[in-house]
Protein backbone atom coordinates (compact mmCIF):
# COMPACT_ATOMS: atom_id res chain seq x y z
CA UNK A 1 0.00 0.00 0.00
CA UNK A 2 1.48 3.39 -0.94
CA UNK A 3 2.35 5.82 1.81
CA UNK A 4 -0.61 8.20 2.19
CA UNK A 5 1.64 11.24 2.46
CA UNK A 6 2.25 11.02 -1.29
CA UNK A 7 -1.17 12.63 -1.72
CA UNK A 8 0.07 15.73 0.11
CA UNK A 9 2.05 18.67 -1.19
CA UNK A 10 5.58 19.22 0.10
CA UNK A 11 4.29 22.24 2.05
CA UNK A 12 1.64 20.10 3.74
CA UNK A 13 4.29 17.52 4.67
CA UNK A 14 6.45 20.32 6.08
CA UNK A 15 3.49 21.42 8.20
CA UNK A 16 3.22 17.89 9.61
CA UNK A 17 6.92 17.83 10.47
CA UNK A 18 6.72 21.17 12.28
CA UNK A 19 3.57 20.20 14.17
CA UNK A 20 5.10 16.87 15.21
CA UNK A 21 8.10 18.67 16.72
CA UNK A 22 6.06 21.05 18.87
CA UNK A 23 3.53 20.71 21.65
CA UNK A 24 0.13 21.90 20.42
CA UNK A 25 1.48 24.81 18.35
CA UNK A 26 -0.78 27.64 17.24
CA UNK A 27 -1.04 28.57 13.59
CA UNK A 28 1.19 31.59 14.25
CA UNK A 29 3.83 29.42 15.93
CA UNK A 30 3.80 27.05 12.95
CA UNK A 31 4.06 30.00 10.58
CA UNK A 32 6.98 31.52 12.49
CA UNK A 33 8.88 28.22 12.53
CA UNK A 34 8.40 27.63 8.80
CA UNK A 35 9.25 31.23 7.90
CA UNK A 36 12.64 30.83 9.58
CA UNK A 37 13.51 28.33 6.82
CA UNK A 38 11.21 29.20 3.92
CA UNK A 39 10.71 32.93 3.98
CA UNK A 40 7.35 34.71 4.02
CA UNK A 41 4.25 32.52 4.34
CA UNK A 42 0.90 34.20 3.88
CA UNK A 43 -2.23 33.61 5.93
CA UNK A 44 -3.90 32.54 2.66
CA UNK A 45 -1.36 29.76 2.18
CA UNK A 46 -1.03 28.53 5.76
CA UNK A 47 -4.58 28.14 7.00
CA UNK A 48 -6.17 26.46 3.96
CA UNK A 49 -3.38 23.88 4.06
CA UNK A 50 -3.88 23.31 7.80
CA UNK A 51 -7.61 22.91 7.12
CA UNK A 52 -6.87 20.32 4.41
CA UNK A 53 -4.74 18.33 6.86
CA UNK A 54 -7.56 18.46 9.42
CA UNK A 55 -10.12 17.33 6.81
CA UNK A 56 -7.89 14.42 5.76
CA UNK A 57 -7.40 13.33 9.37
CA UNK A 58 -3.65 13.97 9.69
CA UNK A 59 -4.02 16.65 12.38
CA UNK A 60 -6.62 17.81 14.87
CA UNK A 61 -7.46 21.41 15.60
CA UNK A 62 -8.43 22.58 19.08
CA UNK A 63 -9.02 25.87 20.84
CA UNK A 64 -6.43 27.36 23.19
CA UNK A 65 -8.71 30.34 23.81
CA UNK A 66 -11.43 32.19 21.93
CA UNK A 67 -8.96 33.63 19.42
CA UNK A 68 -6.25 30.99 19.16
CA UNK A 69 -6.35 27.45 17.80
CA UNK A 70 -3.75 24.76 18.31
CA UNK A 71 -2.85 21.80 16.12
CA UNK A 72 -1.59 18.32 16.90
CA UNK A 73 -0.90 15.18 14.92
CA UNK A 74 -3.36 12.32 14.93
CA UNK A 75 -2.28 8.69 14.89
CA UNK A 76 -2.80 8.80 11.11
CA UNK A 77 -0.41 11.75 10.96
CA UNK A 78 2.24 9.95 13.03
CA UNK A 79 1.83 6.80 10.95
CA UNK A 80 2.18 8.83 7.76
CA UNK A 81 5.38 10.48 8.96
CA UNK A 82 6.83 7.13 10.07
CA UNK A 83 6.00 5.62 6.68
CA UNK A 84 7.45 8.61 4.88
CA UNK A 85 10.68 8.38 6.90
CA UNK A 86 10.99 4.65 6.14
CA UNK A 87 10.44 5.34 2.43
CA UNK A 88 13.04 8.15 2.39
CA UNK A 89 15.57 5.95 4.20
CA UNK A 90 15.29 3.33 1.43
CA UNK A 91 16.64 5.87 -1.05
CA UNK A 92 18.80 8.27 0.93
CA UNK A 93 21.65 7.13 3.14
CA UNK A 94 22.93 10.25 4.86
CA UNK A 95 26.03 10.02 7.02
CA UNK A 96 25.70 10.99 10.66
CA UNK A 97 26.74 14.50 11.59
CA UNK A 98 29.10 14.49 14.53
Image (tube, helix red, strand yellow):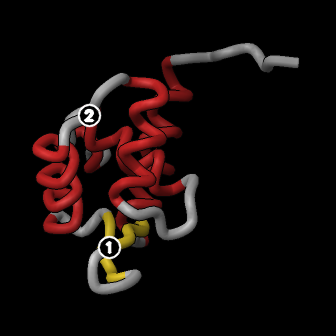
Element class at badge 1: strand
- Viewer-nearest residue: 83 or 14: 14
* Image-quadrant location for residue 74: bottom left
Residue that lies at the very extreme toward the right in this rendered image: 98
> From the viewer's perspective, is 79 left or right of 3?
right
- Residue under numbered circle 2: 41
The structure residue drawn at horizontal position 40% and vertical position 81%, both measured from the top left corner, is 64
Q: Residues within 10 Å of mark 1 (few under 14, many from 20)?
A: some
* Residue 10 sits above or below residue 74 on the image: above
> From the viewer's perspective, is 94 left or right of 11?
right
The tally of labels here is: 2
Image x and y of residue 97, in percent: 80, 18
- Viewer-nearest residue: 68 or 78: 68
Image x and y of residue 84, in percent: 42, 41
Image x and y of residue 79, in percent: 44, 59
Q: Which mark is residue 25?
A: none
The structure residue drawn at horizontal position 41% and vertical position 36%, both measured from the top left corner, is 34
The structure residue drawn at horizontal position 57% and vertical position 53%, both measured from the top left corner, is 21
Residue that lies at the very extreme toward the front in this rendered image: 67
> From the viewer's perspective, is 74 left or right of 94?
left
Are the two marked residues, 2 and 1, in contact with CB atoms closer than 8 angstroms? no
- Viewer-nearest residue: 96 or 28: 28
> From the viewer's perspective, is 10 left or right of 15?
left
Which image quarter is the C terminus in?
A: top right
- Residue under numbered circle 1: 69
The structure residue drawn at horizontal position 42% and vertical position 66%, both measured from the top left corner, is 73
Q: In the rendered structure, which disc, 2 or 1, sits on the residue that comes first in sequence?
A: 2
Cα distance between the residues tagged 2 and 1: 18 Å
Element class at badge 2: loop
Amino acid sequence: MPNPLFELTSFQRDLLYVISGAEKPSGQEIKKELQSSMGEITHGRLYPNLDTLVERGYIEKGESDRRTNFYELTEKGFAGLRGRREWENRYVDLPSVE
